[in-house]
Image: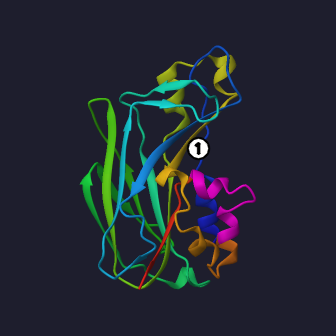
């Protein structure tokens, strides 16, 4: 449980503002993802597809009217998948496979033997658009929670936008994720998890963590 709380607390990376005049307190972009069919229930062996296809010019979701021009930008991120229908998640070895149709995927594992199915992802950039398409194939029954986080370093923003010293360490920049346009994404399955500590670590009164991490839940029967 401790390692999951650490992961969640570090998902929304902070960095500096993208221009050295008129610096706002916060900046944020939301990378859009979608699932095919938005199912809440799959059968063992079914494939749940995740897709992303967005322009390299993104609106700032906090400072309305401002835009980011992010050609050839490092949007690498983390994908996490946890089994949440038991409070004994740490004792479960997830049986899962994935398919990559577009972009790059690099699986990784935690040193403690891990309870989750994780990988790093990177987009394919062509014609001023970023694209990623991958599928997950569950091999065992249960209820699962999927979410994402950015792995881009602060220095990438500072170097890219040439922020001056006065401004660059004062601002916060957030890369968030919007799955199915921040739809419900089967949140009732998430809230029904008996692992209350896990639910509390992600959810809060304003629901921001659930939405901004691109969360999505599904059952396999």
Residue 107 is left or right of residue 209, and the answer is: left
Total numbered badges shown on the rendered structure: 1
Q: Is residue 30 above or below residue 49?
A: above
14 or 204, which lies in front? 204
Q: Secondary structure at mark 1?
A: loop
Query: Residue 58's x, y, as percent?
Result: 47, 31
Q: Looking at the picture, how far across and down is residue 87, in whole percent? A: 62, 83
Residue shown at the point (52%, 18%) measured from the top left = 162
Between 104 and 185, which is closer to the camera in this rendering? 185
Q: Nearer the viewer, residue 128 or 5?
A: 128
According to the picture, the residue beneath numbered tag 1 turns out to be 13
Horizontally, is 129 left or right of 94 in the view?
Answer: left
Q: Residue furthest left?
A: 101
Quadrant in the picture for residue 117 = bottom left
Q: Which residues are magenta?
A: 199-212
Q: Magenta stretch: residue 72 in it?
A: no
| x 37%, y 48%: residue | 52
Q: Residue furthest right?
A: 205
Q: State whether residue 195 is above or below residue 204.
A: below
Residue 109 position, x and y percent, is 42, 66
Q: In which quadrant of the rendered image does the C terminus lie?
A: bottom left
Nearer the observer, 132 or 94: 132
């Amino acid at each position: 449980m401790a390692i999951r709380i650490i992961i969640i607390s570090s998902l929304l990376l902070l960095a500096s503002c993208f221009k050295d005049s008129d610096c706002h307190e916060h900046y944020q972009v939301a990378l859009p993802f979608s699932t095919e069919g938005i199912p809440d229930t799959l059968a063992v062996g079914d494939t749940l597809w995740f897709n992303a296809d967005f322009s390299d010019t993104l609106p700032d979701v906090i400072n309305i009217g401002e835009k980011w021009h992010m050609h050839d930008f490092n949007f690498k991120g983390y994908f996490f998948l946890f089994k949440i229908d038991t409070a004994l998640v740490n004792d479960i070895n997830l049986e899962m496979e994935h398919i990559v149709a577009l972009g790059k995927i690099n699986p990784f594992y935690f040193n403690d033997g891990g309870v989750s199915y994780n990988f790093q992802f990177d987009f394919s950039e062509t014609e001023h658009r970023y694209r990623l398409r991958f599928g997950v194939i569950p091999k065992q029954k249960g209820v699962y929670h999927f979410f994402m986080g950015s792995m881009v370093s602060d220095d990438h923003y500072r170097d890219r936008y040439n922020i001056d010293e006065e401004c660059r360490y004062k601002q916060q920049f957030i890369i968030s994720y919007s799955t199915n346009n921040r739809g419900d994404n089967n949140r009732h399955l998430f809230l029904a998890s008996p692992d209350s500590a896990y639910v509390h670590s992600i959810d809060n009164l304003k629901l921001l963590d659930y939405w901004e991490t691109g969360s999505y839940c599904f059952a396999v029967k």
